[in-house]
Amino acid sequence: MSRDPARELAALRDAHLLRLLRPLGSRQSPTVLRDGRPLVNFASNDYLGLAGHPALAAAASAALDEFGTGAGASRLVTGTLPPHVALESALAELKGTEAALTFSTGYSAAVGTLTALAGKGDTVILDKLSHASLVDGARLSGATVRVFPHNHLAKLERLLAGAPTSGRTIVVTESVFSMDGDRAPLGEIATLAHRHDALLLADEAHALGVLAPEPDIPIDLRMGTFSKAAGSAGGYLCAPRDLVDLLVNRARAFIYSTAPPPAVAAASLAGLALIYSDEGTALRNKLWDNIRRLAPSASSAIIPHLVGDESEALAASEHLESAGFLAPAIRYPTVARGTARIRIAVTAAHSAEQIDALAAALELERRL
Ligand SMILES: *Cc1c(COP(=O)(O)O)cnc(C)c1O
């Protein structure tokens, strides 16, 4: 057989690109159990520690008692229940947009939105470091796909100028980049996009709950997920009413998928409410104290340590694990070949001692 799966796996292993599932024995928290051993967890996107917060569990539990486990059908059939409605109206209000739509995952929000709003004759212009879900959505849409070098405004402007005005153009970027932790200049990108009559989609998966809200930037499509700082699961899209109504009619990832379990929507709403509460502000301040303690100039909770070589990145991650830290090696195809890295994610739940111990271990690793 020309495509023997065992051979394909061996090739991945030889290239240091094989991935394996390694279950944890405990819930998300600053200390987790792997293979029975406690490790300080710097691998989770649970930036505010909400995945284990009692308010989210209580909201999920109450919804579970009232609405049961499964939604039973897609949102357009009988799957729209009070927790879905409450979540979408809270989201639109908090984000200051006319409407909001939720999806089962952030991945399906990205794919559903781009495939519904773009097609043949349209253009999707992506930042080079855009998440795989955005790349997949752009490709699946059938639109012409263009890519600009990371945060390169001049190149973006040239691509905008070259896009056919007969079709819709969507510029796609991320508020906080998932594997580099830096940010996009959203204000400037919005200005450029609107000068060329294009829509701007910003994926705020790693910004929600981490950055203070910036409602003044005119972002047409705010996409994100409840699976990170909001401590729950499910994707969202905040946009003007007409665009959301169009998604309800056209987004196949929304239409042809059973609605998220109502208890999950209830947990997402509790997580969202917490993010926008005084407790959320206090957690965000604690998160930023921890971020600055580890990396004073960081612009998000994601702090990558570039290694380069894939096998060296794996070795560094293994050294850190034997020193008691869970810090994953990120390799191709998640990042470009030869740019493998250790991706550190700091949370509000880490203690100062845990941050200092990691800093010492990273320094030791750098000198090896
Ligand atoms: C995690 C992530 C997603 C997907 O969200 P899920 O809810 O996990 O499916 C989309 N975009 C970015 C940038 C992400 O990091």
Image (cartoon, rainbow, N blue to C red):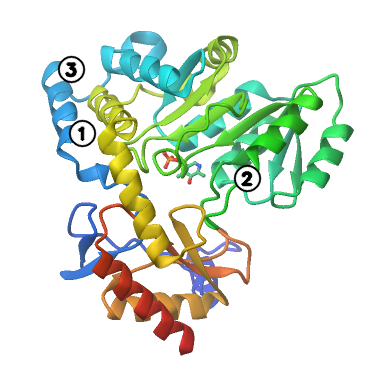
**SS for tag 1?**
helix
- Find numbered disc 2 in the image and state the secondary structure of the residue it sits on: loop
> Of tags 3 and 1, which is closer to the observer?
1
The mark lying in front, picked from 2 and 1, is 2
Q: Return the residue nearer the eye: 350 or 126.
A: 350
Q: Position of residue 246 (x, y in %)?
A: 58, 12
Near mark 2 (Cα within 10 A), the count class, few <14, some 14-19 or many ≥20, is: some
- In the figure, is residue 35 to the left or right of 8? left
- Residue pictured at 46% horizontal, 18% vertical: 100
**Mark 2 CB lies closer than 8 A to ligand 1:** no
Q: Residue at x 57, y 77 (%)?
A: 309
Q: Amino acid at mark 3?
A: Phe
Query: What's the distance in space between the residues labelled 3 and 1, CA to CA?
Result: 16 Å
Left or right of 249 on screen, residue 199: right
Above or below, comparing residue 296 to residue 170 in the picture = below
Give the amino acid type for the residue marked by disc 2 in the picture. Ala
The image position of residue 303, as x and y in percent, is 47, 62
Question: Of circles 3 and 2, which is in front?
Answer: 2
SS of the residue under disc 3: helix
Compared across the picture, whether 156 is left or right of 1 comes to: right
Q: Residue at x 29, y 80 (%)?
A: 322
Residue, disc 1? 56
- What's the mark number on residue 184? 2
Residue 328 pos. (x, y %):
40, 66
Corner quadrant of residue 30: bottom left
**Residue on which disc 3 sits:** 67
Is disc 3 surrounded by few (<14), some (14 to 19) or many (20+) residues within 10 Å?
some
Measured along the vertical axis of the image, is residue 5 above or below residue 163?
A: below
User: In terms of sequence position, does the residue under pointer 2 or pointer 1 come before the other?
Assistant: 1
